[in-house]
């Protein structure tokens, strides 16, 4: 991880761009920043017991706006990867060198994810560390998607690869029997992916809220690679010689088609974020494509940039916002204050938010304040041209 102090125009798209090279798209920074802001909002309510429905994950099958955040990140990884690699390959970079750099970067992202899980490190029982995670999934999906992009060089072959990933995952989850269990039972802890995670990681290293399965497990990383590849297809379309209007229209149409196809596949293979089902991949990539198309049209084509500045600030320092805010939230939950020795977060929520608002609105106000706090911190980073990248 490095911290650089340079002009924004020369900074690569941290944390999702693999290697600096491509001309900046402010719309991509804004889309990334919008996603970061959404993540901060849903991950930091005043109380987990009082949250508006759209700011919760779907209990199992189905989706809410909150379930769009993680696939948006992976979609952005694919777009960024395509724009960077294409430019570097045109300049004569070798595929093997790019692959080696990608592998090193993926390893670093994975380690940073483990570091966040074990923060603040002192006194932590590393024998219980959760191995899967958000950054870990991004690292693995990015590495595999990079290999596919660099060595599967035709569009037809990439489409076939995507189909193999998505249909192969559907086949495994619905037709392969779970040892000692039933076939195709897509319920918490009972699917094939959960069995594999328990066998590989043991329950000690899985998501502590379940222990019998993990939402970022091994098997469901296969279709997550598909999310990144769909982003790569969008990036390929964007770097074509077509006019900006054609590019925008194509992204909107592709996004609508993805939403429809994903919803229809969901009739037989339900849309499910925890299982990262193939229908979820196509459906969420369709929405991502449309949101990105809107950002691209407004910012890079029409030039309406002022509104996007807060999101660009988040987007240009996404890894810092993600990691530092996560560590900060954990510290707030560890420090005990007041006569009742409650967590600092709870103390602030009760005394400065719940004192004047209903529980739902107080919880939302706390989350919004948390987002604004980190926007201020990231603005200072941006103001002094400090950008943390992997």
Image (spheres, grey):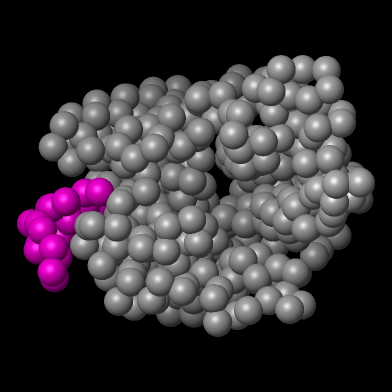
In the rendered image, the quadrant that contains the C terminus is bottom right
Does residue 364 belong to the magenta stretch?
Answer: no
The image shows residue 195, relative to residue 264, as above or below, that is: below
Q: Nearer the viewer, residue 158 or 242?
A: 158
The image shows residue 287, relative to residue 202, as above or below, that is: above
At 69% from the left and 57% from the top, the residue drawn is: 323
The region drawn magenta spans: 159-187
Residue at the outermost front position: 340
At 76% from the left and 77% from the top, the residue drawn is: 122
Q: Nearer the viewer, residue 160 or 285?
A: 285
Q: Nearer the viewer, residue 211 or 63?
A: 211
In the displayed structure, does residue 379 sit left or right of residue 321? right
In the rendered image, the quadrant that contains the N terminus is bottom right
Does residue 175 belong to the magenta stretch?
Answer: yes
In the displayed structure, does residue 125 sit left or right of residue 189? right
- Residue 174 in percent (x, y) is at 12, 53
- Residue 90 in percent (x, y) is at 48, 62
At 78% from the left and 41% from the top, the residue drawn is: 346
At 50% from the left and 61% from the top, the residue drawn is: 208
- Residue 286 in percent (x, y) is at 35, 33
């Amino acid at each position: 991880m490095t911290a650089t102090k340079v002009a924004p125009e020369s900074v690569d798209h941290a944390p999702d761009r693999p290697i600096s090279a491509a001309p900046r798209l402010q719309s991509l920074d804004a889309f990334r920043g919008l996603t970061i802001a959404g993540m901060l909002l849903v991950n930091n309510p005043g109380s987990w017991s009082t949250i508006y429905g759209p700011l919760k994950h779907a209990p199992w099958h189905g989706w809410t706006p909150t379930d769009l955040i993680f696939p948006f990140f992976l979609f952005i990884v694919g777009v960024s990867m395509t724009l960077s690699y294409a430019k570097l390959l045109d300049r004569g970079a070798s595929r093997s060198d790019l692959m080696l750099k990608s592998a090193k970067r993926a390893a670093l992202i994975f380690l940073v994810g483990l570091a966040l899980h074990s923060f603040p490190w002192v006194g932590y029982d590393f024998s219980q560390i959760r191995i899967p995670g958000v950054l870990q999934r991004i690292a693995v999906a990015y590495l595999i998607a990079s290999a596919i992009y660099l060595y599967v060089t035709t569009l037809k072959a990439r489409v076939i690869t995507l189909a193999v990933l998505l249909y192969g995952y559907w086949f495994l989850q619905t037709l392969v029997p779970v040892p000692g269990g039933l076939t195709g039972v897509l319920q918490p802890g009972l699917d094939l992916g959960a069995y594999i995670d328990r066998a590989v990681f043991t329950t000690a290293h899985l998501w502590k809220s379940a222990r019998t399965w993990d939402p970022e497990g091994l098997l469901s990383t296969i279709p997550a690679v598909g999310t990144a590849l769909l982003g790569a297809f969008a990036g390929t379309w964007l770097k074509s010689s077509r006019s900006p209007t054609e590019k925008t229209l194509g992204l909107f149409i592709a996004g609508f088609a993805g939403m429809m196809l994903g919803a229809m596949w969901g009739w037989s293979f339900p849309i499910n974020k925890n299982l990262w089902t193939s229908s979820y991949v196509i459906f969420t990539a369709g929405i991502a494509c449309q949101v990105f198309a809107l950002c691209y049209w407004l910012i890079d084509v029409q030039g309406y940039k002022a509104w996007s500045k807060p999101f660009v600030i988040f987007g240009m320092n996404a890894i810092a916002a993600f990691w530092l805010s996560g560590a900060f939230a954990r510290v707030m939950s560890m420090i005990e204050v007041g006569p009742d020795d409650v967590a600092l977060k709870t103390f602030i929520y009760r005394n400065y938010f719940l004192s004047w608002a209903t529980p739902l609105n107080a919880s939302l106000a706390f989350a919004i304040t948390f987002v604004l706090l980190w926007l201020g911190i990231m603005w200072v980073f941006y103001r002094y041209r400090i950008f943390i990248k992997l």
